[in-house]
Amino acid sequence: KVAADLDPHRIETYTVASYWLRSRLNKPKEAEEFLRAGLKENPNSYEILAELGSVYFQNLKDIRRARNVWELALKRWDAQEPGKKEPDYLGRLQVLDNLANLEESEGNYGKALAYLNSSKPISPNPAAIQKHIEELSAKLKEALAKDASVTPEIESLLTERAKTRALCEAEMLKHFQEVGRAMPPEQGRRYLAWVQERTVLRAQAMESRHKM
């Protein structure tokens, strides 16, 4: 409390003290109150929100609040860090992992997979994330085999797969265009025509003709 009074904008004061209060002294309510005080002084701190989510999930067993707070932490990170020279990817990774574990514990495998797929590119151990993704995908496949109805979890997974596919296609098309621009004009046109006949561009062109 004294340290926070001396420098109320030092984020580590709140997160470290909260960890000790809830983990070592078994005082999660005091940890929650201290973090709430920290948020009043630092309303945009995703770090304090991340720790508050841990208080709710690990200690107070309040799933709804933990989810809401961690989702807010992710929004705060997205609003502050991407434009920085050295974004705090570890902070984002921790929030994503927490949300993935929460959704998995609730049986929401589709949402858990979405968070894991977001964390994989910034993880120092993407192989471990991929293994977890494969395990969860197997669980979801098993759940689908038992119940043919489209549950919210399955719908979430299908949506995430569609997003991932769209991103991959966008990167692929960007590459094709860059290659085509590097060629002499006539050769570039022939190359892009060839690409259109043999890749996803062909499907897109057919869809466009059907809509006309």
Image (cartoon, helix red, strand yellow):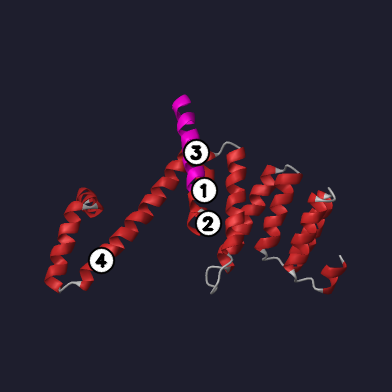
**In the image, residue 95 above or below residue 39:** above
Q: Closer to the N terminus: mark 1 or mark 3?
A: 1
Look at discs 2 and 4 and give the one toward the viewer: 2
For label 4, the SS is helix
Label 1 sits on residue: 128
The residues tagged by marks 1 and 3 sit, at their Cα atoms, a distance apart of 11 Å
Residue 177: which numbered mark, if any? 4
Q: Closer to the N terminus: mark 3 or mark 2?
A: 2
Residue 135: which numbered mark, if any? 3
- Region of the chain picked out in magenta, as a range: 128-150
Q: Closer to the N terminus: mark 1 or mark 4?
A: 1
Q: Closer to the N terminus: mark 2 or mark 4?
A: 2
Q: Do the residues labelled 1 and 2 touch (CB within 8 Å)?
A: yes
The type of residue carrying mark 1 is Ala
- Residue 77 at x, y percent in the picture: 59, 63
Q: Nearer the viewer, residue 11 or 160?
A: 11
Q: Residues within 10 Å of mark 1 (few under 14, many from 20)?
A: few
The type of residue carrying mark 3 is Glu
The residues tagged by marks 3 and 2 sit, at their Cα atoms, a distance apart of 18 Å
Residue drawn at the location 57% of the way across and 36% of the way down: 107
The residues tagged by marks 3 and 4 sit, at their Cα atoms, a distance apart of 36 Å
The residues tagged by marks 2 and 4 sit, at their Cα atoms, a distance apart of 30 Å
For label 3, the SS is helix
Residue drawn at the location 55% of the way across and 39% of the way down: 108
Label 2 sits on residue: 123
Q: Would you say residue 28 sits in the magenta stretch?
A: no
The type of residue carrying mark 2 is Ser
Q: Residues within 10 Å of mark 3 (few under 14, many from 20)?
A: few
Q: Do the residues labelled 1 and 3 touch (CB within 8 Å)?
A: no
Q: Quadrant of residue 72?
A: bottom right
Q: Closer to the N terminus: mark 3 or mark 4?
A: 3
